[in-house]
Image (cartoon, helix red, strand yellow):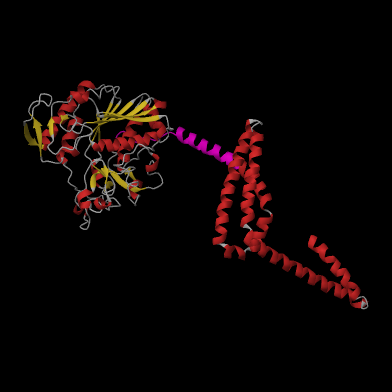
Amino acid sequence: MQPLRRKTPLFSETTPMKGRKNNNLSIFVVVFSIFLFGVFMYNEDVKSIAEFPFSSRPKAQEIQETGSIQKNPVQETKQNDNGNAAFVSLNRRTEDSEETQNENVKGAVSLNQRTEMEDSDETQVKISLEKPIKEEEKKIELPGGEDQEEEQEQEQEEEDNEEVELPPEECDLFTGEWVFDNITHPLYKEDQCEFLTAQVTCMRNGRKDSLYQSWRWQPRDCSLPKFKAKLLLEKLRNKRLMFVGDSLNRNQWESMVCLAQSIIPRGRKSLNKTGSLSIFRIEDYNATVEFYWAPFLVESNSDDPNMHSILNRIIMPESIKKHGKNWKGVDYLVFNTYIWWMNTFNMKVLRGSFDEGATEYDEIARPDAYRRVLKTWAKWVNKNIDPNRTTVFFSSMSPLHIKSLDWNNPEGIKCAKETVPVTNMSIPLEVGTDKRLFVVAHNITKSMKVPVHFINITALSEYRKDAHTSVYTIRQGKMLTPEQQSDPATYADCIHWCLPGLPDTWNEFLYARIISRRS
């Protein structure tokens, strides 16, 4: 209304000039008033456009003023009751969020100035009413933010208390299909698990595609239970879970560590390695997830956990006590042995003992040597394991993907650059797995006095040509160089698996058994 007051004297000065024509005075007044009103509206439009290019600067100043004003309410509120303190704390977070948003808007004005100038009238209203809008937002958003936090906590509590549906005991978990599911998988993020080694962190090591992380195994006749870290840890409370075997079992152990640690705060979890034994400890649950290096389960010249790259591998098929003493008193034991058998067709069996300095050996067929080893292992389990306390698992063979012709890719180089699984699961895939060893392991575990859960990972893993570490890994403790990565025929690791990835599925099988066991 101020501009109208300023223009009233002009009207009063002009009127006497037209005083002689009293009969036309009223018409002139009406016309001239319309003219002044039009000039006024034009000036207001010009004013809004003129002010628009500078609108971002007052916003920045307002942000600084708002930030300085926020300090006092927080200090004053600390003297109030707890409810008010919580309200102001949320208020501050809301305003901080608005400040950040205003900074982003400030940067965007220069990029979108042409578009926003077309909407100058809307911008003018936004600027003139900015503070009242903020105050209104505080009133609306603050309770909402508090309610949202409470709602999230309630949802988390409800999820933790939600009953998990277990698969029927008779359901075959290992016959099914791979389903792409980027909603529930991966079960954890690579960069959120500090305990992963450089051998398996494929994304960190340069791999660009991440689809391999999002495939979920769907059994044909049932479903795997929803993974809940808290439920797993409750089942592991005051217990020990140990993986025993070769580097594939270590691969699976790293996966289990990541699954278990996801809800444990820093400072309440630790990892220690002593000799062949690695122990991940979860303080609040007095639980451990452990790995024991024994690639053949029995004694061998490859038992050193750090220096075991030996081509001339020799085993003692009937000697297991030296390793076995470390497995006693464990609540969950997960055994495997396979990959270290695959570098030669025959196995070297020592005559005598390493402790006695024996060096002579006999060569026997791989399946025969494998059978002798597993019989020794089965005898130890039957003698030393109390099935009322300890649950025993044996994992079948983890496959290799060395020849791309096995999955009809003549242009491929081993498993390098494979980004999706083999999708045609109607026909069994042959990738060179020694099924003779599979039969030996299956038959021996089923004939034992102590119950052993045979985890059949072989067939379902054979379709996962996409999930290996390939050239995104280390070799002899060092990261592959760019030159080595460009030579997958020589350097691609098509034995071990990226994490998150396939071994998480293997652990879902263990999880299903562990949570179904009555404590």
Closer-to-camera residue (38/179) = 38
| Residue 77 spot, x, y in % from top left | 65, 34
Tell me the magenta residue range.
Answer: 143-170
Q: Quadrant of the C terminus?
A: top left
Whether residue 59 appears in magenta in the rendering, the answer is no
| Residue 447 spot, x, y in % from top left | 18, 29
How many badges with numbers are in the image? Answer: 0
In which quarter of the view is residue 301 placed?
A: top left
Chief SS of the magenta region: helix
Closer-to-camera residue (315/227) = 315
Q: Quadrant of the N terminus?
A: bottom right
Does residue 229 appear anywhere in the picture?
yes
Closer-to-camera residue (71/232) = 71
Vertical relation: 60 (above or below) 350: below
Whether residue 150 appears in magenta in the rendering, the answer is yes
Q: Residue at x 62, y 48 (%)?
A: 64
| Residue 245 spot, x, y in % from top left | 23, 33
Does residue 143 appear anywhere in the picture?
no
In which quarter of the view is residue 258 placed?
A: top left
Vertical relation: 9 (above or below) 436: below
Q: Is residue 42 left or right of residue 82?
A: right
| Residue 218 spot, x, y in % from top left | 33, 44
Q: Is residue 519 left or right of residue 444?
A: right
In which quarter of the view is residue 228 placed?
A: top left
